[in-house]
Amino acid sequence: MYLIEKNDNKIFIDGQVTNLSKLRDIWTGIIILSEKIDNKKTKDKEDFNWLQILSGGFIIGFIIFNLLRSSLNMLSISFLLFNVLGLLFALRTHRDLLNWENKLTEKICGITKSECDTIFQSNKWKILEKIKLNDISLVLFSTQLLSFLFFNYLGNTENFYFFFHKFLIASIPIIILSIFYQGAIIKQWCAICLSISGILITQLFITSFVSNKSYSTNSVFIIIFILSLVTYIWILSKKHLLAHQAMKETLLKLNSFKRNYSLFQNSLLNQKITTSPIDKGIIIGNNHFDKLEITLVTNLHCIFCKKAHLIIDDILAKFKNDLKIRIIFSADRKKIDKETELLYLTLIQISKRNKKEFYNALSDWFDDTNLERWLRKYREEITINPKILDEDLQWCRANGFNFTPVMTINNFTLPTYYQISDIPYLISELLNDDSLKKDKKVHVS
């Protein structure tokens, strides 16, 4: 087994630089593929973790505020703690759906993680196709918590304990059913499921000491209302979460299809050819590298062009020395004011003096599109001919580029179902593709 890595367009075998022919010699046809985690996904996960922390902090703060208003005995505190613990376990049973992780529940699930997932996803009994045991536990513990806080706020926990003592007695057949299902039907044990069963039995034991024999009719309606509300919210939420999960899975499959380079190449080679922008635009990257040239047609007031610019940033960060990038402005001087024309001409003039300074100025513009502030920083006397914008626009129109952004890669137009955001995942293969000749052109929109 060999560790194959690719970095800065160089191939490494077990840490040693090698070439493509040697890689072909040792390749047996079997690979284990590892891909770097997308920074955006990581950032999304970090943002979600912060959302979890804030939401959890708000709930805990509300619970503490509620409890400080009353004096609870040890049995009530114990019941509440087991309620919160049960809710955490119930949430853990929906971990994949909620994209939710908790260190405590993960440790308890431990080595039986696969068994837990098998139990949650099993449909060996027809009834479990419609009514999931993990849904019942989530609704039950959520209803418990909200009802406890509400009745505690009213100073009337006796009614709460009376009803939930009955609920917990009614849960005994479900507990027995769950244990039988794991041991006799699935023949696997789920630590989370057993923990939830243990919590329910413990709560039943606690309520047997604090439950009264009397209750009020109003309390019945309050608990039924809370139970109905929680059930309704969860049904709607789960429906939305399942749809979102299905969409993510479909998107992953679509991306896998689009990033198959053989399919991309075959589609690419059948696209129309554009005329070469030999003397047009601003070149950044490796000016002397002709094997792969990317041309970006952009407009400084196009919001989609900002996204395209960020993609160019990503490409340059990884392949700056291995390709040529040409930026062409599509701007009609008859339709823009003098200040906007000055913006374009200033950028072009800066590029003729210093490419790095040009790219920094372009990045500053997309970071903050306040024309007054940008000109205050970069304004200079214009010495170039403004007709340079007309020539670039004429080239764009001659090739049918009446919109922005457009990206061209060597000689062929990219299939319409590909987007600029797909290109970073295909650059490595493009750099090694000898079928894309220098005298052809490709465009991406």
Image (spheres, grey):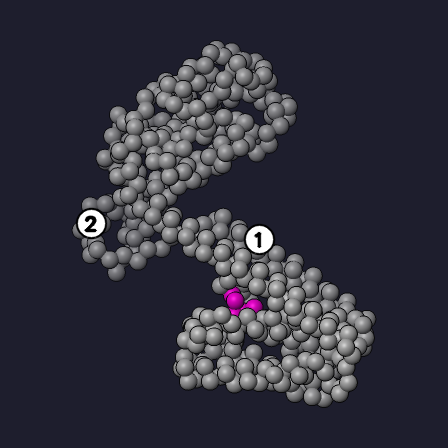
The picture places residue 111, in percent across and down from the top left corner, at: 44, 75
Q: Is residue 33 above or below residue 275?
A: below
Main secondary structure type of the part rendered in magenta = helix
Question: Mark 2 to mark 1: distance in Å?
Answer: 42 Å
Q: Which residue is mark 2?
A: 24
Q: Amino acid at mark 2?
A: Arg
Q: Which residue is mark 1?
A: 47
Q: Is residue 25 above or below residue 224?
A: above
Please, which residue is most extreme toward the left here?
25
Regarding mark 2 in the picture, which secondary structure is present there? Answer: helix
Q: Residue 365: which quarter of the image?
A: top right
The picture places residue 404, in percent across and down from the top left corner, at: 46, 28
Q: Amino acid at mark 1?
A: Asp
Q: Does 91 lie within the magenta span?
A: yes
Give me the residue at 75% from left, 70% from top. Answer: 150
Give me the residue at 50% from left, 34% from top. Answer: 304
Q: Quadrant of the C terminus?
A: top left
Tell me the magenta residue range: 90-95
Q: Nearer the viewer, residue 158 or 55?
A: 158
